[in-house]
Image: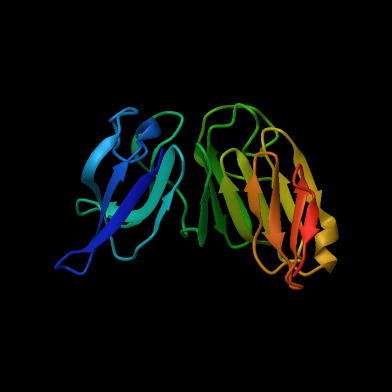
Amino acid sequence: WGTLCATEEKASGELAYWCWGANWNSALVPGNGNNAVDTPTQLDLVASQDVLAMGYGINCALGKIANGAENLYCWGGPADVGYTQQALDPLPSQLALGAAQVFALRAGEVFAWGENAAEQLSLGNSTTPILPPTKLPNFTGVKAIDASGNATAALLDNGEIWWWSIYDVRHEEALSSLGVKLSASPADFGGCTLLESGCIHCWSDFAGEICP
């Protein structure tokens, strides 16, 4: 089920990506279907900095192909696409990848694309797949974002947390007065976050707090 990647610094100073393991939706090696990659395989991308975000069935990296310009590329996903350049300029400051969804944070706004049959992109519709990056409506002042499986959580500048998945939508407004120290860790049926007090606050199916 797992995947691994490593970087190699080339003589030019650029980085090469080597990956192996599970290959759902061609997430590791484009065009290879779901066939596992048994030996380390070099990706076509080279990069000036180590930015590789890995999801369950889709991956993204900052890099360039051949002598092209450096940009954000994603592969795998619901359409089993090859390397697809994402039209985000300027580039995002953070990426969060779910099972087959990508969320990109840029200047406090969130852009999303990928599988959306169960409205897991929070765009207000079930059109799928969403392939061009699409800005999430009514989301501003986002400080951090995280995703896992079919769940996503966003931490706002005011300390609020928004969490959504294919099973539920939850707005943790009460956390704004508790002091969120770290971004939330989402799961399909709930999630948790670390507070300034040192307590771990959880919601939905995991509701409760654990304090030192």
- Relative to 176, say whether 117 is above or below: above
**At which x and y percent is residue 60?**
40, 48
x then y, percent, for residue 22: 35, 37
Total labels: the figure holds 0
Q: Nearer the viewer, residue 142 or 172?
A: 172
Residue under the point 59% across and 63% down: 107
- 181 is higher (above) or lower (below) than 27: below
Give the position of the C terminus as an image quadrant. Answer: bottom right
Tell whether 68 sits left or right of 176.
left
Q: Residue, x 83% and y 56% (percent of image)?
A: 173
- Residue 138 can be seen, yes or no: no
Between 39 and 63, the residue placed more toward the observer is 39
Asked which quadrant contains residue 123, the reply is top right
Residue 171 in the image: state x and y as whole percent.
Answer: 79, 49
**Which residue in the rendered view is the most extreme toward the bottom?**
197
Can you say whether 181 is above or below 82 in the image? below
Answer with left or right where residue 17 lies relative to residue 128. Answer: left
* The N terminus: image quadrant: top left
Judging from the image, the colouring scheme is rainbow
In the displayed orientation, state which residue is furthest to the front: 212
31 lies above or below 10:
above
Question: Residue 138, how many percent across, how many down?
Answer: 73, 49
Q: Residue at x 47, y 52 (%)?
A: 88
